[in-house]
């Protein structure tokens, strides 16, 4: 297992050196230890690369509903799942059932050597409150808002809010 990990890290370093010499990559500032959902949504909307969203709730809860694109990593398996699959310098946003679970998960990742871990404050509830996209069993049964997917309706709504007498 250790030799496979070393081989992967060595290959990644070689690719990074080759690519780094040809195409310089802009350096991202490290994520804050705690982030609000607006920060994450902004990164998603602007297409910023190289970050992962981890949902540390149990698998059944995850299946009911989660942030679109979040990876299930139940807290009791978090480090074992993350070590072989995520680079230690990757930006990781983590959220759980509550703030305590989120903090615990972030600390576990930091203790395992992950350098850029951010606790997503408010978790799934805060994400839904700002209209972030979700997926899962319950989420698929929840009807969208009046203009969530209807472009014409969204444009009409925008047009009506812009019609003001001056």
Image: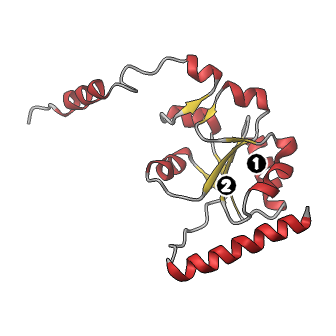
Q: Compared with residue 41, is residue 3 higher up or lower down, i.e. above or below?
A: below
Q: Secondary structure at mark 1?
A: helix
| Residue for point 48% across, 33% down | 131
Q: Quadrant of the C terminus?
A: top left
Q: Nearer the viewer, residue 100 or 90?
A: 90
What is the crowding at mark 1: few (fewer than 14 residues within 10 Å), some, or many (at least 20)?
some
Q: Position of residue 139 (x, y in %)?
A: 58, 23
Q: Quadrant of residue 148?
A: top left
Q: Residue at x 64, y 41 (%)?
A: 70
Residue under numbered circle 2: 92
- 150 left or right of 100 in image: left
- At mark 2, the secondary structure is strand
Q: Where does the image place residue 83, in percent across and percent down from the top left? A: 81, 57
Image side of residue 108 versus residue 62, left or right:
right
Q: Residues within 10 Å of mark 2 (few under 14, many from 20)?
A: many
Residue 109's place in the image compared with 146, above or below, is below
Q: Nearer the viewer, mark 2 or mark 1?
A: 2
- Residue at 20% over, 31% down: 159
Query: Which of the two discs, 2 and 1, labels the residue nearer the N terminus?
Result: 2
Q: Quadrant of residue 13?
A: bottom right
Are the residues at dot 2 and dot 1 in contact (C-beta closer than 8 Å)?
Answer: no
Q: Quadrant of residue 11?
A: bottom right
Name the spot of residue 66 as percent of width and height, x first.
64, 33
User: Which residue does the numbered mark 1 point to in the structure image?
Assistant: 103
């Amino acid at each position: 297992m250790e030799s496979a990990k070393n081989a992967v890290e060595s290959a990644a370093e070689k690719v990074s050196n080759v690519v780094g010499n040809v195409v310089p990559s802009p350096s991202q500032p490290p994520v804050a230890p705690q982030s609000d959902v607006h920060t994450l949504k902004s990164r998603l909307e602007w297409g910023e690369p190289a970050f992962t969203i981890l949902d540390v709730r149990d698998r059944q809860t995850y299946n009911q509903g989660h942030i679109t694109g979040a990876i299930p990593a139940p807290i009791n398996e978090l480090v074992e799942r993350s070590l072989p699959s995520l680079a230690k310098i990757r930006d990781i946003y983590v959220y759980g059932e509550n703030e305590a679970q989120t903090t615990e998960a972030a600390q576990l990742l930091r203790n395992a050597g992950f350098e850029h871990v951010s606790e997503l404050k408010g978790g799934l509830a805060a994400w839904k409150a700002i209209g972030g996209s979700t997926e899962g069993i319950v989420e698929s049964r929840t009807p969208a808002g009046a203009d969530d997917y209807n472009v014409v309706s969204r444009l009409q709504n925008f047009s009506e809010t812009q019609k003001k007498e001056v």
